[in-house]
């Protein structure tokens, strides 16, 4: 698996949101954090890769343009988690995860589907939610179920839009670890939009920093600098090593714009 983007332009009507971005080939197993300020286009980028927003340019997966991939293959390849939480409907988690798997993985036997569901609940640590109605869950619990609906299909290209936005610290770590493991296990590629730079630095192989209209930088966690923070977010900040050696961001103050 590999993933690259070439001369990508995305907009809504006549308004360009992302102009002419190119991302060199990312290797299989890569987890890429997509970061940047509000309204810069993180969700728009993921939606366009998922085929939900039109674009010009080329998005290549495994040496094939996504736009020319047969629909059945495309649906099986992609795993898109939208920013919005799953609706609080009266179905139980098991039912919605089952439907998500069945709708896409028509190649699996009933036994394999059962196994995939068991595995997903187990890996995410949410077996206790299996028979609970979504209408009776908290926002964070529904976010976990939304992620289970994506992971159960074992997609090769994961597009996750702020998958930890509703989660407490324990579940943030749990989810990022699960995404990390899944991506490695499946030899997949994951793009994860996030506002949490420290989680991104801890769990991702690359950080794609978006700036208005384009890419500011594609760096490994140890290449992130205070200049990136100033240019992307308009803040004065530090990038230091924590006691375990991981880079961490300390935001000191907002710079005048
Ligand atoms: N359906 C739409 N129609 C028109 N404009 C849109 C639409 N969706 C998003 N936009 C605009 O596109 C720009 C990028 O939005 P997007 O949601 O991709 O940003 P983001 O980086 O994900 O933001 P945030 O961090 O706040 O979630 C914003 O200016 C937004 O107003």
Image (spheres, rainbow, N blue to C red):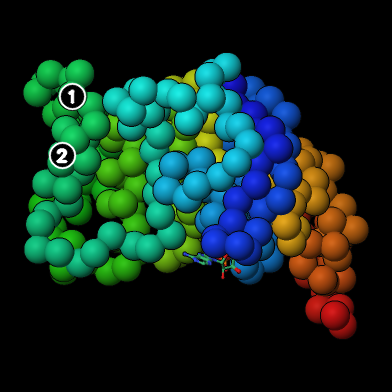
The quarter of the image holding the C terminus is bottom right
Residue 98 - label = 2
The residues tagged by marks 2 and 1 sit, at their Cα atoms, a distance apart of: 12 Å
Q: Quadrant of residue 29?
A: top right
The answer to whether one can see residue 179 in this image is no
Residue plotted at (61% across, 62% down): 14
23 or 84: nearer the viewer: 23
Q: Earlier in the sequence, mark 2 or mark 1?
A: 2
Q: Quick check: 77 left or right of 130?
A: right
State the residue at coordinates (72%, 43%).
21
Do tag 2 and tag 1 residues touch (Cβ < 8 Å)? Answer: no
x, y percent for residue 10: 60, 51
Label 1 crowd (10 A; few <14 / some 14-19 / many >=20): few
Of 15 and 226, nearer the camera is 15
Circle 2 residues within 10 Å: few <14, some 14–19, many ≥20: some
In the displayed structure, 238 sits above or below 145; it is below
* 58 horizontally vs 241: left or right: left
- Total marks drawn? 2
The residue labelled by disc 1 is 106
Q: Position of residue 208 (x, y in %)?
A: 70, 45
Query: Helix or strand or loop: what does disc 2 sit on?
Result: helix
Q: Position of residue 166 (x, y in %)?
A: 42, 65
């Amino acid at each position: 698996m590999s993933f690259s983007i070439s001369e990508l332009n995305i907009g809504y009507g006549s308004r360009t949101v992302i102009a002419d971005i190119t991302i060199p080939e990312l290797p299989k197993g890569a987890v890429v954090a997509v970061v940047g300020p509000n309204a810069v286009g993180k969700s728009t980028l993921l939606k366009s890769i998922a085929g939900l927003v039109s674009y010009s340019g080329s998005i290549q997966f495994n040496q094939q343009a996504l736009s020319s991939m047969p629909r059945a293959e495309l649906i099986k390849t992609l795993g898109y988690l939208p920013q919005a939480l799953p609706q609080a409907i009266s179905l139980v988690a098991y039912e919605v995860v089952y439907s998500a798997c069945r709708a896409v993985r028509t190649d699996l036997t009933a036994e394999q589907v059962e196994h995939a569901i068991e595995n997903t609940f187990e890996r995410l640590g949410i077996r206790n939610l299996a028979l609970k109605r979504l209408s009776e869950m908290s926002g964070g619990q529904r976010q976990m179920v939304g992620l289970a609906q994506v992971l159960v299909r074992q997609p090769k290209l994961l597009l996750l839009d702020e998958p930890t936005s509703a989660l407490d610290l324990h579940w943030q770590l749990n989810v990022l670890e699960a995404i990390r493991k899944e991506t490695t296990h499946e030899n997949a590629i994951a793009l994860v939009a996030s506002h949490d730079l420290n989680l991104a630095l801890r769990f991702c192989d690359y950080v794609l920093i978006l700036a208005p209209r384009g890419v500011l930088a594609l760096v490994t966690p140890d290449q992130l600098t205070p200049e990136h923070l100033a240019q992307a977010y308009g803040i004065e900040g530090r990038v230091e090593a924590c006691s375990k050696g991981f880079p961490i961001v300390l935001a000191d103050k907002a710079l005048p714009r």
